Image (spheres, rainbow, N blue to C red):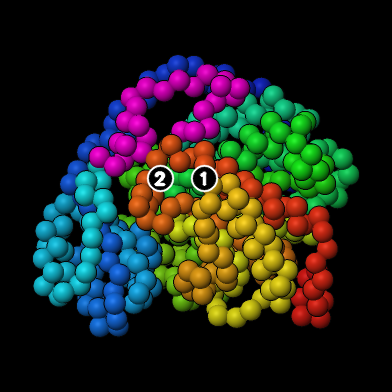
Amino acid sequence: MGLDFRGCAVRCWVLLAGVIIFSDMQVPVDAYLYNNRYVGDQVFRVTPRDVTEVQVLKRMLGNIKVDLWQPNSASLIRHNATVDMHVKLNDTQGLHAHLKQEGIAYNVFISNLQKEIEKQTGYRSARRRRSESHYDYEVYHSLEEIESWMFEVNRTHPEIVDMFSIGTSYEGRPLYVLQIGKRSRPQKKAMWIDCGVHAREWIGPAFCQWFVKEAINSYQHNSVMRRLMNQLNFYIMPVLNVDGYHYSWTTDRFWRKTRSKNHKYHCRGVDANRNWKVKWCEEGASSHPCDDTYCGPFPESEPEVRAVAKFLRKNKKRFKAYISIHAYAQMLLYPYSYKYAMIPNFSCVESAAQNAVTALYSAYGVRYRYGPASTTLYVSSGSSMDWAYRIGIQYAFAFELRDTGYYGFLLPEALINPTCTETLRAVKAIATGLLKKCQVNRDVFPYI
């Protein structure tokens, strides 16, 4: 299998009864409607023009509970930077009045969140899911569907696919990974891709599935993909935050964190991208359990984070690239996230990022910004990307997929295909770059 994961390999030849994937089955309407909990909720967009407006807006948000979409913490609000916030029905009128009173310009880009949720999934009460060959990659899938699909892909492509578990989540769900690549020499270079770190970012798991589909289907006839799979192993984790993702389907569409319990507060969950052992719980992370950017009680407190960290640490000599898929902003980010500084191998990583966004643009003309996360997006500590770079993975990236706020987290299913198609080009460009040598000063980057 290439990497060392004794004790967690799952050959998966015997499928669970429900895995003859997906005979026609009814999906409860309530699974899409969330019991109408979002009727009348609105999403506001505000761009504070100066420091005074930033302070006024922060003061308002201290008196009203909102779900910040961008940035994900009020502490990160800056002038001339967009603020997207989901406001409950009972608070919308008050916020309209306060913003007008203070003379702060704003607009409402989603006027009824419930209707937008129904639109995103096509408001289907039933869907057809039969087999892997008829699996619909252009709709969003529940965790159960994704796991069943993984079993089926593993069963039908044993020559290039291995499925294994690296541990279990807080609620006891298995943490599955797919290894994709031609079985050849045992010391092959590897690339890690994880999706679904933040539960509400559904386009992430959709991309991970798309990548696997394209890798398998194009292996025989696409020379670029064949070369990549012959020389690299790809480790794909479609849903890292399995508990949170499941919860975003059943209960709260906009849930972000894990689902671990806190003994002192009723609030649940930790931000799985603030829980890594790199400048843990410093700037851009919160120590309060009720905040969306809660860093957790200690680094790697979350079993999902701990499992991935353990696997990558154990096999770090093989991994040449780490990619984490997020949404939304249309950005390709690289370290550092926790500080304003240039990484030692900046020229190599910058070149890889430029090639990736150029390849992405070639599909549909969609522009992505790229650069260090701290200056391109915002400062955040305890991120998986910075952690991967710190342990010696030379190319560590985080994608923020479509869009830039028109749909936000509710990217329609009609945009899954173009979003995944263009992102695939970017990931292939990064992977292709791994096969070439980039000269780096070994004195300043001793991991190489």
Q: Residue at the location (48% across, 69% down)? A: 377
Q: Residue at the location (46% across, 66% down)? A: 295
Quadrant where the image shows the C terminus: bottom right
Residue 343 makes an appearance in the image: yes
Q: How crowded is mark 1: few (under 14 residues within 10 Å), some or many (20 or more)?
A: many
Q: What residue type is labelled 1?
A: Thr
Q: Residue at the location (69% across, 37% down)? A: 215
On the image, the x and y values in percent for residue 319 come to 74, 56
Helix, strand or loop at label 2? It is loop
Give 376 or 340, whichever is nearer the viewer: 376
Q: Give the range drawn in magenta.
A: 115-139
Q: How crowded is mark 2: few (under 14 residues within 10 Å), some or many (20 or more)?
A: many
Residue 16 makes an appearance in the image: no
Determine the image quadrant of residue 33: top left
Q: Distance between the residues labelled 2 and 1?
A: 10 Å
Asked if residue 138 lies in the magenta stretch, the reply is yes
Q: What residue type is labelled 2?
A: Leu
Asked if residue 267 lies in the magenta stretch, the reply is no
**Which residue corresponds to mark 2?**
411
Give 404 or 4, whichever is nearer the viewer: 404
Helix, strand or loop at label 1? It is helix
Q: Which mark is residue 33?
A: none
On the image, the x and y values in percent for residue 429 come to 69, 53
* 79 in relation to 197, above or below: below
Q: Residue 419 carries which label?
A: 1
Quadrant where the image shows the N terminus: top right
